[in-house]
Image (cartoon, grey):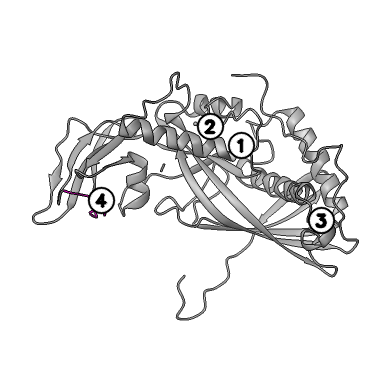
Amino acid sequence: MQTFEPAAQTPQPSVDSSIPPPQRTAAPQSWMVRVTDAKYHWYDLLAGFAEKPDIRDPIGRYMRRMQFELDATSEHNHLFFAVTRPRVRFDIAGALQWGFFSLKLTLPLLLGAEQTKDSITVELKVPFAATMKKPSVTLTENFISLNWGGLVEVFSVHDLLMTYAHTLKLPSKVAYVGRTRDPEGRLGKGRLPAMHKVRAQFGEHYDTLLLVIGTEVEVSCAEGDPAGHDVNQHPQAADALHAERVDMIEAALIRYFEGSAPRFHGTEERQQRSERITAVQAANHLVQYTIDLELPDTGFYNYLSSEFVTSAKRHLLSCFVADGKAQVAPMPLPTPLKGSKA
């Protein structure tokens, strides 16, 4: 599948002061961070949406499902990227083309500000509940609906480009790195101030997507991982440790993708983040951490770049804290073993 403004979003405190802090180790730590799951959502479909979608309509159900998924992330400490891509739409005035004796379907597209004509060919698979061998097709600018008789499948134009191979050169650029946890659930309602700024910056000729990622942290420490100690198994202690780790990952990814003076993060927010990561680094005796950013299960949207970063499928980063800031250096990727997949 594919989300007004007080000041810029400010980081929320990681730990409730009324809860005793988790117990940590006295020995130095180093961390290895990996992405466990990732999912894209087309934020523009939600931003500024005034009314609830009609769930009696297949596209309305698609929209509500996306909103529910994003609303659910507000309870969790996940990271998200605001990813911009050149505008792409279905050409509703163009002609659909079916392959002979197959389910290959060629769909007309309009690309970029100039609305350049192009196309994508997909080979459909008959769903289990279908009662027709070939679906009837309905196109809007943003969606394709496939009526198989027994059910209706709905895909956004970005779903198609994400799922099926194509030769279009449309880069995915990270403009903003943020956190999903938010008691107000502004991300799923299209009301996050920073996201309004991103969309205003890039304008109507770019699409804005949200990439929500989950991470895991492997801790190297002579005394073991504090998260694995019995004393820290209480949900509040575990959540506090997890929030601290996400603090450090977020700071490093902001520095990597947005540069040393990120324009969508205000001065007060930066100061709060500086104080927090300094405290987290000291409390955990964190010497260094490595982030292996490679997206699982995102199909053909698995390359990321930014104004400061060259497009790549995998970003391997060496990170540490100095002078209250996350310092980040790209590392060379390991050479694949002979005979293994690159």
User: How far is the residue under mark 2 from the one under mark 4?
Assistant: 31 Å
Q: Quick one: label 3 or label 4, which is nearer the N terminus?
A: 4
Image check: 22 left or right of 193? right
What secondary structure predominates along the stretch shown in magenta? loop
Judging by the rendered image, the residue that carries numbered circle 4 is 129
Report x, y in % for residue 140. Answer: 26, 31
Judging by the rendered image, the residue that carries numbered circle 1 is 74
**Quarter location, residue 16:** top right
Select label 1 or label 3 by which is in front.
3
**In the image, what residue occupies the spot 22% across and 49% down?**
130
Identify the secondary structure beneath mark 3: helix
Judging by the rendered image, the residue that carries numbered circle 3 is 232
User: How far is the residue under mark 1 from the one under mark 4?
Assistant: 34 Å
User: How far is the residue under mark 3 from the one under mark 4?
Assistant: 47 Å
Q: Quick one: label 2 or label 4, which is nearer the N terminus?
A: 4
Residue numbers of the magenta segment: 122-131
Depth check: 225 or 268 in front? 225
**In the image, what residue occupies the spot 47% across and 21% down?**
48
